[in-house]
Image: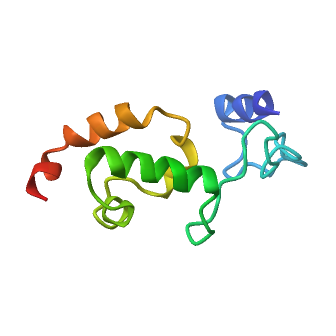
Amino acid sequence: MMGRWMQKIQKGAGDAPTKPTKPSFVGSVGAPCAHFPKKHAANDPLTPQQIGWLAAVASLLEVGAGQLLERGFIDRHDLDEQHDADPRQVAALIKTNPRWHQC
């Protein structure tokens, strides 16, 4: 399909090229990929696993779980994607954030 357009452009055929009869990407746009899990909406309730992980990180930092969420040290994406990470490593990483020392 693209070869036809290139030939017309190179030959200078016509001022306005015609539209292709059908796009080559039909059927692939908007198709969900089965390999990626569906993300939770921001207002979905937390799973017990997420709550446990958040509580473990908060305990290591000696703050409330709500404090981590409210101050943006942990967000919904972290809860969805990082809940398998070692809470000790996550707590250590949060402590390196310059904003942590301002709390």
Outermost residue, bottom direction? 43
Residue 53 drawn at (x, y percent): 50, 47
Q: Can you say which quadrant of the picture contains the C terminus?
A: bottom left
Considering depth in this image, is 97 or 20 the residue closer to the camera? Answer: 97
Give the residue at x 55% y 67%.
42
- Asked if residue 78 can be seen in this view, the reply is no
- Asked if residue 74 can be seen in this view, the reply is yes
Seen in the image, is 75 located left or right of residue 21?
left
Up/down of 59 relative to 89, above or below: below
- Coloring scheme of the render? rainbow
Considering depth in this image, is 43 or 32 the residue closer to the camera? Answer: 43
Residue 79 drawn at (x, y percent): 52, 51
Give the residue at x 82% y 40%.
34
Seen in the image, is 54 located left or right of residue 48?
left
Up/down of 69 relative to 54, above or below: below
Q: Can you say which quadrant of the picture contains the N terminus?
A: top right
Based on the displayed image, in which of its 4 quarters is residue 25 positioned? top right
Residue 48 drawn at (x, y percent): 63, 56
Give the residue at x 28% y 36%.
93
Seen in the image, is 18 located left or right of residue 81?
right
Outermost residue, left direction? 102
Give the residue at x 53% y 43%.
83
Based on the displayed image, in which of its 4 quarters is residue 96 positioned? top left
